[in-house]
């Protein structure tokens, strides 16, 4: 069995064993951290930083992908608790330019719940992957954009644009970029190693991610894949989706080689940290950790209230329905077959390739799993690496 570093509290030994078994079949590395009742009960790591040929250890940090979206949601909820942000207010109250092109009535809650109809950039905005580093260009393009559907009437994952949309609200209200706000109001208070915009001083700790590569020169397969499913790829909605997919894939590929992809603030997905940081962040939302609690019970309840269960995707993409759609509250994912978390009551967010973090307030549990091997596709059920230790963890806490 693979060697596992770190420690577990008494009664959680089976979690460590299951984690070790899963990582024994993984050519990469991973960390798992669990808080219960504000105390850290699991803090373990194993495997390899394959790209840099060294152990994946306690001090390793990795890109968190879309787990970053939960950190952005947390910042927005903190502003709401301070009375600066109203979930039911028009976005244009805080960001006047956003009112153009029929968006005057889009509410803050529709940005947070992926129902605003702005799931990608219009092709005519000419936002190339490298343009993601230009914050103003991206938010200006979204301010000008006409929604792809009637806001609030459909739901589809805003994979790339979520960070710009909610991040711009945070910037307008706080006077700080989302990375600056998170650094001062969350990371510093919790003393966690997590950044949205990685300082150069932390680069040596970074473990690049990796994934199976397709044949060299292989054309973009997505247009054909959509066409096979019966999607008309000439519609505006499909064109925006295709561009969003290409942008996401390009970002994942350049995140290791281009320092800008780690240094810039791309709050839809370039948060960098470790499982210890993510788990403590979630623990601070549902209880007090080291004297710090970041959200009230009332805010957490609102954040995990389902907002998309009665909505479908846009009609043009109806043939893509998997029978297991993403479910959203205010900025957080809710349990589904591919992301079971701890069932009803859980809230959290997964990240591309297999990252996962969530909390369950009634159980007092906060969990984070971070990895560098991009395995999970988000479509064919849970990541196999999660299954054993989640079952052991359920048994350890009596569910």
Image (cartoon, rainbow, N blue to C red):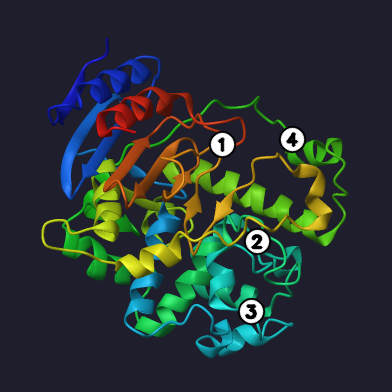
Sooner in the amino-acid sequence: mark 2 or mark 3: 3
SS for callout 1: loop
Nearer the observer: mark 1 or 4; the answer is 1
Q: Position of residue 376 (x, y in %)?
A: 52, 32
Q: Mark 4 points at which residue?
A: 219
Check whether the beta carbons of the residues at disc 3 and disc 1 lie within 8 A of each other: no
Nearer the observer: mark 4 or 2; the answer is 2
Q: Which residue is drawn at 78% across and 56% down?
A: 239
Sooner in the amino-acid sequence: mark 1 or mark 2: 2
Mark 1 crowdedness (10 Å alpha carbons): few <14, some 14-19, many ≥20: some
Classify residue 21 as left or right of residue 123. Answer: left
Q: Where is residue 251 in the image (x, y as percent from the top left)?
A: 53, 48
Q: Residue at x 48, y 62 (%)?
A: 331
Q: Position of residue 93 (x, y in %)?
A: 53, 90
- Of the 4 image quadrants, the one containing the C terminus is top left
The disc at residue 106 is 3
The disc at residue 337 is 1
SS for callout 2: loop
> From where the camera sits, is residue 10 visible?
yes
Cα separation, mark 1 vs mark 4, equals 31 Å
Mark 4 crowdedness (10 Å alpha carbons): few <14, some 14-19, many ≥20: few
Q: Mark 2 points at which residue?
A: 119
């Amino acid at each position: 069995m693979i060697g596992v570093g770190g420690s577990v509290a008494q009664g959680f030994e089976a979690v460590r064993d299951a984690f070790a078994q899963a990582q024994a079949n993984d050519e990469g590395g991973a960390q798992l951290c669990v808080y219960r009742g504000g105390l850290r009960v699991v803090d373990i790591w194993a495997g390899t930083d394959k790209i840099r040929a060294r152990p994946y250890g306690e001090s390793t940090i990795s890109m968190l992908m879309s787990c970053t979206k939960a950190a952005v949601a947390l910042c927005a909820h903190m502003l709401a608790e301070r009375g600066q942000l109203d979930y039911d207010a028009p976005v244009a109250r805080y960001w006047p330019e956003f009112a153009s092109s029929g968006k005057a009535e889009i509410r803050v809650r529709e940005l947070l719940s992926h129902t605003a109809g702005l799931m990608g950039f219009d092709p005519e905005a000419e936002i190339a992957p490298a343009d993601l580093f230009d914050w103003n260009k991206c938010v200006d393009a979204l301010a000008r954009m006409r929604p792809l559907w009637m806001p609030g009437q459909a739901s589809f994952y805003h994979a790339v644009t979520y960070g710009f949309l909610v991040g711009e609200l945070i910037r307008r209200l706080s006077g700080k970029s989302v990375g600056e706000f998170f650094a001062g109001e969350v990371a510093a208070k919790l003393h966690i190693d997590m950044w949205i915009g990685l300082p150069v001083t932390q680069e040596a700790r970074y473990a690049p991610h990796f994934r199976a590569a397709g044949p060299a020169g292989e054309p973009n397969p997505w247009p054909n894949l959509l066409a096979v499913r019966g999607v008309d790829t000439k519609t505006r909605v499909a064109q925006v989706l295709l561009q969003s997919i290409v942008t996401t894939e390009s970002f994942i590929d350049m995140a290791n080689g281009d320092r800008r992809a780690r240094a810039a603030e791309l709050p839809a997905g370039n948060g960098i940290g470790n499982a210890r940081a993510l788990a403590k962040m979630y623990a601070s939302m549902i209880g007090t950790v080291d004297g710090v609690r970041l959200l009230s019970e009332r805010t957490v309840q609102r954040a995990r209230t389902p907002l998309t269960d009665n909505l479908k995707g846009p009609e043009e993409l109806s043939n893509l329905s998997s029978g297991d759609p993403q479910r959203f509250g205010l900025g957080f994912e809710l349990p589904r077959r591919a992301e079971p978390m701890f069932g009803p009551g859980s809230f959290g967010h997964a990240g591309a390739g297999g990252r996962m973090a969530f909390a369950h307030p009634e159980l007092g549990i906060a969990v984070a799993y971070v990895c560098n091997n991009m395995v999970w596709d988000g479509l064919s059920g849970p990541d196999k690496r999660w299954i054993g230790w989640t079952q052991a963890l359920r048994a350890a806490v009596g569910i």
